Image (cartoon, rainbow, N blue to C red):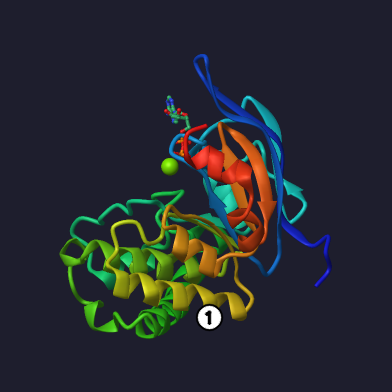
């Protein structure tokens, strides 16, 4: 793997809310093929950084590059086209849609419109949608929730909804997938399944950047791990390095 093969580059990102600097001069690179973890105490700026990277917030300063393309001034759906897709901590339920229909709409962006229709002419949409549905069904089967495909999405548990959200995101074949707390509120058994699915997808080449509060989960899954504290990158390293760094312990103890 080319060490310089960054799928995502963030340079000097800054965002303040009034007087509060939530993200303060953050620079980082996500290497292609990795599962990179992002941790940090509450209020460290993790969600703000995700929102800046995915284009949901406008930055005060800095830039975001996806596959070396500067997307700083692009809308979320343009970043999605560029290969950057995110999921949300709390996926919205798609009222009145079955899981199958939800899969067809594509990942919750970013859009409100189908990702598919952004790429191809209207005449091709139907064929493309059929292909996507096949891929989606394959993923649901793999995630062991294919029996839910005709259920209203409002009937799913929180954990099942997270899996559907993950499947929807993967269907678009992103270059980098940002997951915001993929196992928050998920029972331990399902959390273990999600870990296994993420690992398998990574072995097939999928790059991930994952925010997660569940420390054993992320330390077992990610390498490297980036630690944010008070809007800044405190350190980046292997799980072992992070675990043994006194600055990280201080940050979590509220130093
Ligand atoms: P984390 O996800 O690491 O817990 P956040 O990015 O949510 O941290 O928050 C970082 C800081 O920015 C916090 O002090 C939070 O209160 C503040 N913040 C986040 N989003 C907003 C917002 N939309 N308006 C005002 N303050 C915000
Ligand atoms: Mg957060």
Q: Secondary structure at mark 1?
A: helix
- Going 21% across and 76% down the picture, which residue do you hit? 150
- Going 28% across and 57% down the picture, which residue do you hit? 185
Name the residue tied to disc 1.
200
Image coordinates for residue 29, horizontal then vertical, percent: 72, 51
Q: Is residue 216 left or right of residue 66?
A: left
**Which of the 4 image quarters holds residue 73?**
top right
Image coordinates for residue 119, horizontal then vertical, percent: 57, 61
| Quadrant containing ligand 1 | top left
Camera-side residue of 185 and 242: 242
Vertical placement of residue 232 versus 122, above or below: above
Q: Among all residues in the image, which is located at the extreme top?
A: 19
Image coordinates for residue 223, horizontal then vertical, percent: 63, 64
Image coordinates for residue 32, horizontal then vertical, percent: 71, 65
Q: Residues within 10 Å of mark 1 (few under 14, many from 20)?
A: few
- Going 44% across and 51% down the picture, which residue do you hit? 109
**Which of the 4 image quarters holds residue 237?**
bottom right
Vertical placement of residue 97 versus 181, above or below: below
Q: Is residue 235 left or right of residue 188?
A: right
Camera-side residue of 215 and 2: 215
Looking at the figure, which quarter contains the N terminus? bottom right
Q: Is residue 174 left or right of residue 150?
A: right
- Going 79% across and 62% down the picture, which residue do you hit? 5
Q: Is residue 82 visible?
A: no
Q: Is mark 1 within 8 Å of ligand 2?
A: no
């Amino acid at each position: 793997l080319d060490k310089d093969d960054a799928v995502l580059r963030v340079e000097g990102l800054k965002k303040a809310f009034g007087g509060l600097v939530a993200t303060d001069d953050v620079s980082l690179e996500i290497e292609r093929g990795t599962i990179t973890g992002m941790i940090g105490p509450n209020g460290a700026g993790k969600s703000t950084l995700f929102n800046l990277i995915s284009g949901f917030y406008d930055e005060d300063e800095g830039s975001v590059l996806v596959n070396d393309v500067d997307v700083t001034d692009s809308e979320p759906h343009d970043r999605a086209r560029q290969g950057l897709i995110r999921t949300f901590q709390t996926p919205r339920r798609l009222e009145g849609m079955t899981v199958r229909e939800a899969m067809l709409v594509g990942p919750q962006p970013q859009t409100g419109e189908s990702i598919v229709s952004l790429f191809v002419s209207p005449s091709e949409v139907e064929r493309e949608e059929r292909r996507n549905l096949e891929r989606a069904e394959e993923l649901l089967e793999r995630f062991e929730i294919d029996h839910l495909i005709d259920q209203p999405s409002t009937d799913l548990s929180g954990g099942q909804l997270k899996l559907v959200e993950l499947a929807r995101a993967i269907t678009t074949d992103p270059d980098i997938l940002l997951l915001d707390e993929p196992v928050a509120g998920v029972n331990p058994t399902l959390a273990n399944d999600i870990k296994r699915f993420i690992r398998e997808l990574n072995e097939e080449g999928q790059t991930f950047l994952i925010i997660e509060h569940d420390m054993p989960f992320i330390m077992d899954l990610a390498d490297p791990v980036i630690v944010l504290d008070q809007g800044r990158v405190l350190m980046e390293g292997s799980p072992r390095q992070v675990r043994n760094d006194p600055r990280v312990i201080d940050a979590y103890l509220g130093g």
